[in-house]
Amino acid sequence: MAHRFVCTDRVHFSDTDMAGIVHFSNFFRYMERVEHAFFRSLGFSIVDPADAGAERVGWPRVHASCDYMAPLHFEEEFECELLVEEVRSKVLRHLIRFWKMDRTLAAEGRITAACVRRDPVTHKMKAVEIPQRFRDKIEAAPPELLQRPDRK
């Protein structure tokens, strides 16, 4: 079962402000990208295919936050580390850390996503139990991995 996923990314020009530093809002895009890559690594997509039938679910965000420690600059490579912070009956919570290549913590964010299904009649989303196919592959990370590491 998976509780950690890591990938490397690079700061693009369009991610930066006039000073060449990543604009704070782009960290939310990075968080979404690593979350999607995590799902793909488990053989899923963040969007269930139409043939998933009654099991077809979505994952809208009900919370997102980010704390910033050190800037990332244009062309800089960085590592995104996703840790599954909590698996509840209808919710996944992810802790996402952004590491500079010298292992300085640049930022730390959190995403909470609810598992939902769209009602076929009203088209409203309703929180539902996370299907077993996800539960079989996703688990919460050990507490020692979730503790904030010492910063450089």
Image (tube, rainbow, N blue to C red):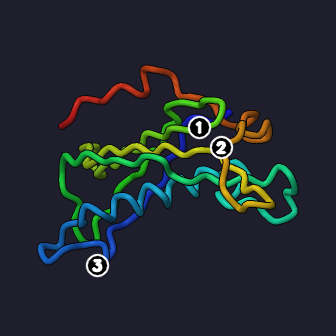
Which residue appears at 58% of the width and 56% of the height?
37
Name the foreground residue: 14 vs 48.
Answer: 48
Judging by the rendered image, the residue that carries numbered circle 3 is 13
Asked whether the beta carbons under mark 2 and mark 1 sit within 8 Å of each other, the answer is yes
Report the amino acid beneath label 1.
Answer: Val
Q: Position of residue 134 (x, y in %)?
A: 73, 41
Q: CA distance from mark 3 to mark 1?
A: 34 Å
What is the spatial separation of the Cα atoms under label 3 and label 2, in whole angstroms?
38 Å
The circle on residue 127 is 2
Disc 3 crowd rating (10 Å Cα; few below 14, some 14-19, many 20+) is some
For the residues labelled 2 and 1, the Cα–Cα distance comes to 9 Å
The tag earlier along the polypeptide, 2 or 1, is 1
- Quadrant of residue 110 in the image? top left
Q: Amino acid at mark 3?
A: Phe
**Dot 1 crowding, Cα within 10 Å, few <14, some 14–19, many 20+:** many
Q: Is 64 left, or right, of 47 in this rendering? A: left
Provide residue 126's location: percent of width, then percent of height.
67, 48
Helix, strand or loop under label 3 = helix
Looking at the image, residue 71 sits to the left or right of residue 114; the answer is left
Q: The residue tagged with tag 2: helix, strand or loop?
A: strand
Determine which residue is flagged by label 1: 91
Quarter the N terminus occupies = top right
Query: Which of the marked residues, 3 or 2, is nearer the chain's N terminus?
Result: 3
Tag 1 or tag 3, which sits nearer the N-term? 3
